[in-house]
Image (cartoon, grey):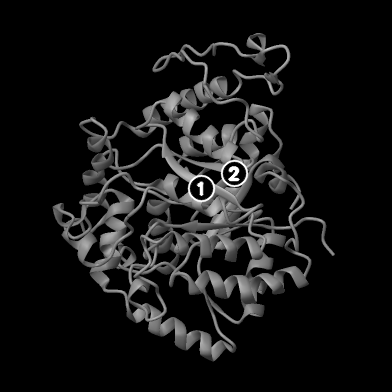
Amino acid sequence: MTQRRMHLVAYLKTGPTANHPGAWRHPEATLGDIFAPERYEHIARVLETACFDACFYADTFGLPDIHGGNFDAYLRYGGQITYLDPLMILPVMARVTKHLGLGATLSTTLMPPYHLARTLASLDMLTGGRAAWNVVTSATNLEARNFGMEQIPSKDQRYDRADEVLEACNDLWDCWQPDAFVMDRESGVFIDPAKVRYPVHEGKWFRNYGPLTIPRTPQGRPVFLQAGASDRGREFAARWAEMIFCTPHSKADTIAFYDDVKSRMDRYGRRPEDCKVLPSFAVVVGETEEIAQEKYAYLQSLIDPEAQRMLNSSLMGADLSKHRNVESFAAAKGNQGISGSIDRVMQLMDQEKIAFQDAVAKPRDLLVGTARSIADHLEDFFTSRACDGFIVWPTIFPSMLEDFSTYVVPELQRRGLFRREYAGATLRENLANP
């Protein structure tokens, strides 16, 4: 049995659509419970029963309106929309779980350090040390406008600011010593003021006044998840990230990304094992290969080609109903767009020798097969040192994650590749000891 074991994290949305723009149309997709707490309690129990390290909610702070110059297509085709604030959902999920890590997406470009530190410390305290922060710098002008800005800043400026935000947040989280609470009724001392200090951060964008009103949490700070694929994003990840969410097109692309990020960590005094690289995927599981292929064909038939372009318009930062080649797209996107999504399309064009307009209309690849053949694929990536585990995003919700947990996870456990029980009390402890 191998001593190295993979990590599993679920990508979620507070709505029925993730990266597959047609799956909400499937008869198995639940739609009537989007605003019901039971929906989120159920998936939390499913993931914890399967011993997932964590889940996190992807988020966009606005209604995407890039495609066609308005939000019509995103509403009509059921795009990736956040119908509820995940910060309201995660405590609901915490109440029915004991081990599952719980992550929120929050932006260093749009939100100040004190607000971020206070919110995440509260989540970590309430979950007993299971909070994760998907650190994003945001990538669309629509999000910037919703927070009082004219447009999103350049990528380098966003990451420079993100470095300072994390420095400032860490200063705030360190204001309280672990034993500051005395709560001695006889002496009349509730908190020892000598063990609480003002933060020291004073930088280009922020000066912390603090301290936080929240004492040191079980983890000290949340686990940092990050998805930057640009050169500047990889440098940020090497400094801060404990989990990386990536979307390369092929195994070779994944290995190249893995090796590059790990090679950058030493300059920040970090070990390669301190950061888990997790490529993302979704599955179609069948009792036989033929059944799986039939399920896959039906699922893909539910995608309207315009819905796929609409999704990529939002992810890549330009209107793909108008810009049909690389040059036109690059000139139009400005500071917008997620580098990982753009890279994946470019890799697809190069490796499959297809045109840009065909690549942006092509749905993302899914892993299709039996539990055994899917486990074979995951084992190959993992043992080839292409990754440290995987992020699983749903197509049909909740049945795809249920199928993965019921059929694929036991196969991975049988091979000694994945845990059968949790070893730690906090998310960071479970990442260190899978």
Asked which quadrant contains residue 241, the reply is: top right
Quadrant in which the N terminus appears: bottom right
Q: Check if mark 1's residue and mark 2's residue have beta carbons within 8 Å.
A: yes
Instruction: Pick out the residue farthest to the right.
Output: 1
Q: Give the labeled residue for mark 2.
A: 127
Residue bearing mark 1: 91
Outermost residue, top direction?
194
Taking depth in this image into account, of 172 and 415 the one nearest to the observer is: 172
Q: Is residue 6 left or right of residue 64?
A: right
The mark that comes first in sequence, 1 or 2, is 1
Q: Residue at x 49, y 74 (%)?
A: 399
Q: Secondary structure at mark 1?
A: helix
Name the secondary structure under disc 2.
loop
Horizontal side, residue 336 vs residue 322: left or right:
right
The reply to whether residue 121 is in sight is yes
- Answer above or below: position of 310 versus 212: below
Amino acid marked by disc 2: Thr
Say how many tags the image has: 2
Q: Is residue 229 visible in this depiction of the protein?
A: no
What residue is rendered at 52% in x and 47% in y?
A: 103
Q: Which three-letter amino acid code belongs to the residue tagged 1?
A: Pro
Could you tell me residue 76's position as x and y percent? 20, 66
